[in-house]
Amino acid sequence: MAGHSQFKNIMHRKGAQDRKRAKIFARLIRELTVAARISPDPASNPRLRSAITAARTANMPRDNIERVMKKAAGDGDDANYEEIRYEGYGPGGAAIIVDAMTDNRNRTASEIRAAFSKHGGNLGETNSVSYMFDRVGQVTYPLGSASSEEMFEAALEAGAQDVDSSGEIHEVTCRPEDFTSVREYLEERFGEPQEAGLAWKPQTSVEVSEDRAPALLRLLDTLDDNDDVQVVSANFNISDELLARLTGN
């Protein structure tokens, strides 16, 4: 398992995340709220379109999505969410980036710092690990939406940088400034993507040993459980065999 994809964030916990639907919806609502305040029109707001796609993928009812957008556009929510990024190292030397959205900076900083400290990690300063990642746009489609050749050709025409169809999805990556045009081109060809947005892509991966992996996974679990955390990105790699033993999956 590689801990590198924003959209496959901490996949060893997928079953647990599925059982925490309310928590997932809360995160999606925050993103919808912030995005809708930029502009309530999805046609002119790529971030809002991405947020809507994520909400639909999580099976959030359409009425809920529309209600959140209307409330945000009407400024009916008093919460003033602030986007903050935290960076640090986990057990085994894994670099970790935590993207949070909070209405209380002091609370969130304290909780994130405590999580790193408790589980053998070290919270660093801004840019202490992000230089080891590339900021990219990512658009994903199910494998059945197109052949590898069709997706590659379309991504090339759209101006994307790379396509990975080796797993269960087509993952198209591009420069952040090209994200909107690439996504729109692919939408015209293949319909609405499974997921789309900006992500931290590691330049290299760190192999985590068996003795350090449990602590790293506990740290990632703790971060993922935090209500203010939106996305956790990391550059670790744990073998499938070891992951299966540690998680019982």
Image: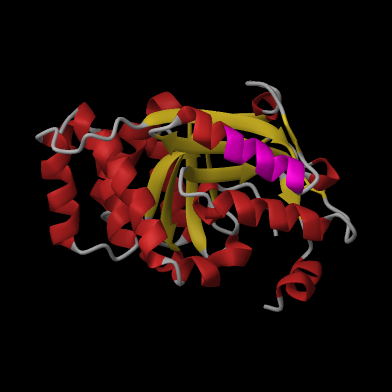
Left or right: 181 as drawn, with respect to 19: left
For the rendered model, the colour scheme is secondary structure
User: For residue 73, what is the image quadrant?
Assistant: top left
Q: Which residue is depicted at the point 27% across and 59% down?
A: 56
**Quick one: 154 or 214, which is closer to the camera?**
214
> Where residue 238 appears, x then y in whole percent?
77, 58
Judge whether residue 70 is colored magenta: no
Left or right: 184 as drawn, with respect to 64: right
What range is drawn magenta here? 110-118
Would you place residue 179 above or below residue 18 in this image?
A: above
**Quick one: 234 or 103, which is closer to the camera?**
103
- Position of the N terminus by quadrant: bottom right
> Where residue 159 appears, x then y in whole percent?
41, 32
Would you place residue 193 above or below residue 134 in this image?
A: below
Left or right: 232 as drawn, with respect to 174: right
Q: Which residue is depicted at the point 67% across and 21% down?
A: 125
**Quick one: 132 or 59, which is closer to the camera?**
59
